Image (cartoon, rainbow, N blue to C red):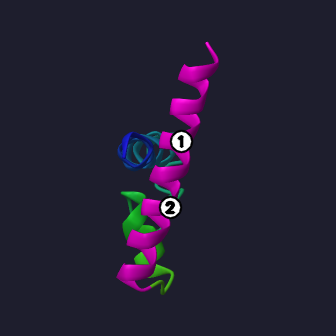
Amino acid sequence: AGFVLVAEALSVILQVIHFKRTGGKRLFRMAPIHHHFELMGWAEPKIVVRFWILGIIFAVLGLVSFKVR
């Protein structure tokens, strides 16, 4: 879950920085990133499941890296 929250926050931060530096061009169609995927035509359940999968993968990676140390 931590990765998803960080990705959502970073997408907003990157969108604002890019918008200001390029004089109005957007990095994503809309931020946070899940809205970008919605505007690309992805169904909401598809986005949710993909974010769950990413959350699980990064949680497992975190546990594995903790176990290795």
Q: Circles 2 and 1: CB distance less than 8 Å?
A: no
* Residue in front for this viewpoint, 61 or 42: 61
| Image spot of residue 38 (x, y percent) | 41, 78
Give the residue at x 50% y 58%. 26
Three-letter amino acid code at disc 1?
Answer: Val
Q: Residue at x 43, y 71 (%)?
A: 49
- Residue situated in front as seen by the camera: 2 or 10: 2
Kind of element beneath mark 1: helix
Question: What type is the residue that disc 2 sits on?
Answer: Ile
Q: Which residues are magenta?
A: 43-69
The earlier-in-sequence mark between 2 and 1 is 2
- Residue assigned mark 1: 60
Gap in angstroms between the C-alphas marked 2 and 1: 11 Å
Mark 2 or mark 1, which is nearer to you? 1
Residue at (40% x, 65% y) in the render: 34
Residue at 61 percent across and 12 percent down: it is 69
Q: Is residue 61 magenta?
A: yes
Q: Which residue is mark 2?
A: 53
Q: Which of these two is toward me, 25 or 38?
A: 38
Q: Is residue 64 above or below residue 1?
A: above
Residue 13, image quadrant = top left
Q: State the image coordinates of residue 54 (x, y, percent, origin top left).
A: 52, 55
Percent of width and height locating residue 15: 45, 49
Magenta stretch, main secondary structure, is: helix
